[in-house]
């Protein structure tokens, strides 16, 4: 299961989406999260779904990668949808029992919430799959650069994000190895009641924490050995270049926002 985790992984490619400036992709993802709240009917959500689908098509990445990005959060999404269905008041009541009232409006609202979650996860997954972690953190540092004027440690924040993104897949692989070792010793992570399942996770957490601490110490030693002093006066090996297509991308999102405003009810 751990090998299907998508967060923090980069898929090598030469598609149009891969070649975009990471700052443009990061801004576009933020804009998408904002404009998706303008959608409030089937036409607007269909337009957003087609928009996201076209982006996935341009990335030349299999749809299965994006579906795997949704799977770790599916229970949280379904729980949120269930709350929306049960507690959304409506005139067209389909089922009523005690405090549980299911209406047509609640079902529609639940479907919209589900689509909203899935589309946002698809877009953020598209960002991470087509952008190298180092490029993404450089884009974050660039966008946060004005914060230096008020004392925000921009470089340190970008460095922490870079390390976190870099080591998420590594820690997941380490977790898989530990789970396989525990299974070889007779521990089953999927049997018993909830208490027993949680109890079986404890032998996995301790070696995982020890491994994480050891990796952090090794990384700190390596940075000190190379004379790392922080962001002041440092140059960058990769230079970000904003091109015309990046401006066009932001224009496309502006057009999508206008579409949602026109067709919202």
Image: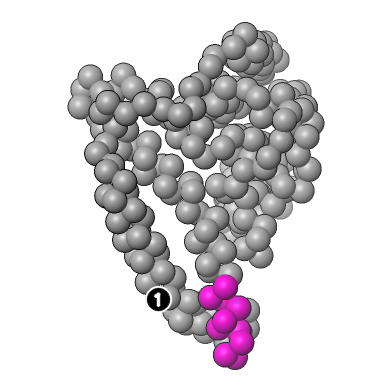
Q: Residue furthest front?
A: 226
- Left/right placement of residue 95 relative to residue 181 reads right
Q: Is residue 78 above or below residue 178?
A: above
The answer to which of 201 and 42 lies nearer the viewer is: 201
Residue located 57% across and 90% down the image: 185
**Where's residue 180, x and y in %?**
60, 78
Q: Main secondary structure of the magenta part?
A: helix
The reply to whether residue 30 is visible in this rendering is no
Tell whether position 180 is magenta.
Answer: yes
**Where's residue 153, x and y in %?**
26, 33
Tell whether position 226 is magenta.
Answer: no
**Where's residue 83, x and y in %?**
57, 50
The answer to which of 252 and 226 lies nearer the viewer is: 226
Q: Quadrant of the C terminus?
A: top right
Q: Residue furthest bottom?
A: 186
Q: Quadrant of the N terminus?
A: bottom right
**Where's residue 23, x and y in %?**
51, 23
Q: How is the image coloured?
A: one colour
For mark 1, does the 10 Å Cα neighbourhood hold few (<14), some (14 to 19), or many (20 or more) residues? few
Residue range (magenta)? 177-186
Residue located 59% across and 12% down the image: 243
Q: Is residue 98 above or below residue 233?
A: below
Q: Return the residue at label 1.
A: 206
Q: Is residue 193 above or below residue 163?
A: below
The reply to whether residue 165 is visible in this rendering is yes
Residue located 54% across and 62% down the image: 172
The answer to which of 172 and 87 lies nearer the viewer is: 172
Secondary structure found at label 1: helix
Residue located 37% across and 36% down the image: 158
Quadrant in which residue 117 is drawn = top right
- Left/right placement of residue 170 relative to residue 230 reads right
């Amino acid at each position: 299961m751990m090998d299907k985790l998508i967060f923090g992984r980069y898929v090598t490619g030469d598609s149009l989406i891969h070649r975009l400036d990471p700052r443009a992709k990061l801004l576009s993802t933020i804009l998408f999260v904002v404009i998706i709240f303008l959608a409030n009917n089937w036409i607007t959500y269909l337009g957003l779904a087609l928009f996201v689908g076209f982006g996935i098509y341009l990335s030349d990445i299999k749809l299965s990668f994006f579906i795997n990005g949704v799977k770790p959060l599916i229970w949280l999404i379904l729980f949120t949808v269930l709350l929306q269905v049960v507690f959304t008041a409506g005139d067209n009541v389909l089922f009523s029992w005690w405090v549980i009232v299911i209406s047509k409006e609640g079902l529609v609202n639940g479907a919209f919430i589900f689509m909203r979650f899935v589309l946002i996860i698809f877009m953020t997954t598209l960002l991470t799959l087509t952008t190298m972690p180092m490029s993404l953190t450089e884009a974050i540092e660039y966008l946060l650069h004005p914060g230096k004027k008020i004392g925000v440690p921009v470089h340190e924040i970008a460095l922490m994000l870079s390390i976190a993104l870099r080591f998420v897949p590594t820690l997941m692989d380490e977790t898989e190895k530990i789970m396989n070792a525990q299974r070889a010793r007779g521990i089953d992570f999927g049997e018993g009641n909830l208490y027993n399942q949680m109890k079986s996770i404890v032998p996995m957490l301790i070696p995982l924490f020890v491994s994480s601490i050891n990796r952090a110490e090794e990384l700190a030693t390596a940075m000190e050995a190379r004379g790392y002093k922080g962001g002041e006066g440092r140059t960058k090996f990769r230079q970000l270049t904003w091109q015309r297509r990046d401006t066009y991308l932001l224009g496309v999102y502006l057009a999508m926002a206008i579409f949602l405003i026109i067709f919202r009810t």
